[in-house]
Amino acid sequence: MNNKLGLYLHVPFCDSKCAYCDFYSYRADVLLYERYTDTLCEHIRLAGERLKRQVDTLYFGGGTPSLLGGERIKRLIDTVRASFKGEIDEITVECNPADDLKADFELMKKAGVDRISLGVQSGINSELKALSRRHSVSDVIRTVNAAKAAGIHNISLDLMLGIPHQTMESLKASLDFLLSLEPTHLSCYMLKIEPDTPFGRADIKTLDLPDEDTVSDMYLFTSEYLQKHGFEHYEISNFAKNGFRSKHNTRYWLCEEYLGLGPAAYSFVNGQRFSFDRNCEQYLTAPHISPDGEGGDFSEFCMLGLRLKEGLDFSELERRFGAKPTELLKTKAEKFRNTGLVDLTDRNLCLTVQGFLVSNAVIGELLF
Ligand code: SF4
């Protein structure tokens, strides 16, 4: 077993709630930020003592981790370094472009943050408004410039496809806007309407969403356009310049282990999957862990691996799980050989970009 772990710290605070979001987050104040940071530091120390593993990627996700501010983020990073052995190869902080982060970026850089992820979502102000995002296009420019001025050049930007009012033209304008900021990485997600959100409760007709075929075209166009501009489409929703894949998130797709701390954070440690309950007050007073069984079986390994451009290597599958399930998978994959959805060779199976688009259906057929 690889002794190294990724560490994910969940920060469940947002200054306002976006209309489509069902992540666990809510509005809080500085007192709670302080209490939460103290608790996380304590849990990091305990985990370090118990697990005795190395941590080589650290990811602050949320919510809006940048709300904690540079000082608290530094305190958390220092605690991780003091509690876990090993060099940390990548430290990412998710940030909200609505806030003025100039001073925080300087502190983060000093603390070792070398990558930020910005939830831009669109380069069109009216679309941002429809998503009830707090920021505007000019806020994004200001934030990217501030990060670069602080010396953080590894910048990932999020874009959403299939959002209210979006057209192929406005998508291209958003992509051009993102490219003009010279990011190293882009995450492009299709909007999913979650039931327990304002979008989920709204009459769908009032949202002015592009239809399903248009969203599919948007996905294929995004892939082609970004590849033309020097980005590798390395995972279903992720694009990177050479050498800038997300190291932390790649762990998930390679079925490697990680510890998640904070309410609603998931973990895969010592072969077991578990999560903390979605309840911050409980996390602060008496954290409760819900077990989720053993992780890393054949289906899970394949399901995650097929998200990556490289797909699955048959000799690696045989080494881990034996010949029988591997042969069965090869037989099922044969049915897809001439569909344009998979690339199948004697050594390897992977999804094409067309296959990425319908990955749930293809993976379902291949594995279940
Ligand atoms: S900023 Fe991100 S986590 Fe917070 S409500 Fe909006 S989408 Fe959700």
Image: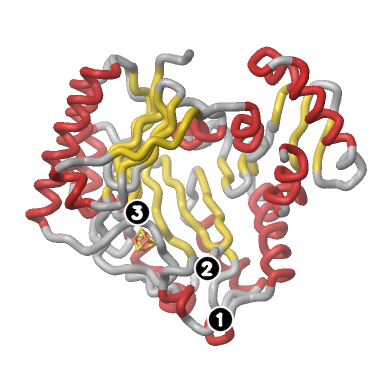
Q: Nearer the viewer, mark 2 or mark 3?
A: 2
Q: Position of residue 12 (x, y in %)?
A: 27, 53
Q: Residue at image x 54%, y 31%?
A: 243
Mark 1 residue element: helix
Residue nearer the viewer, 159 or 174: 159
Rounded to the nearest whole Å, what is the CA distance between mark 3 and mark 1?
Answer: 37 Å
Query: Where is 322 relative to 252, above or below?
Result: above
Residue nearer the viewer, 66 or 350: 350
Instruction: Check disc 3 and give the amino acid type.
Output: Asn
User: Is residue 211 shown left or right of residue 32?
Assistant: right
Instruction: Check disc 2 and give the amino acid type.
Output: Ile
The residue identified by callout 2 is 193
Q: Are marks 1 and 2 in contact (CB under 8 Å)?
A: yes
Query: Where is 155 relative to 74, above or below?
Result: below
User: Is residue 84 shown left or right of residue 6?
Assistant: left
Instruction: Check disc 1 and give the amino acid type.
Output: Ile
Q: Position of residue 158 (x, y in %)?
A: 48, 55
Which residue sits furthest bottom?
Answer: 206
Rounded to the nearest whole Å, what is the CA distance between mark 1 and mark 2?
Answer: 9 Å
Ligand 1 neighbours mark 1 (CB distance < 8 Å): no
Q: Residue at image x 31%, y 47%?
A: 277
**Quadrant in which residue 330 is drawn:** top right
**Crowd rating for badge 3 (residues with CA inside 10 Å; few <14, some 14–19, many 20+):** some
The mark that comes first in sequence, 2 or 3, is 3
Q: Are marks 2 and 3 in contact (CB under 8 Å)?
A: no
The mark that comes first in sequence, 3 or 1, is 3
The residue identified by callout 1 is 204
Mark 2 residue element: loop
The residue identified by callout 3 is 145
**Quadrant hosting ligand 1:** bottom left
Which residue sits furthest left?
Answer: 31
The mark that comes first in sequence, 1 or 2, is 2
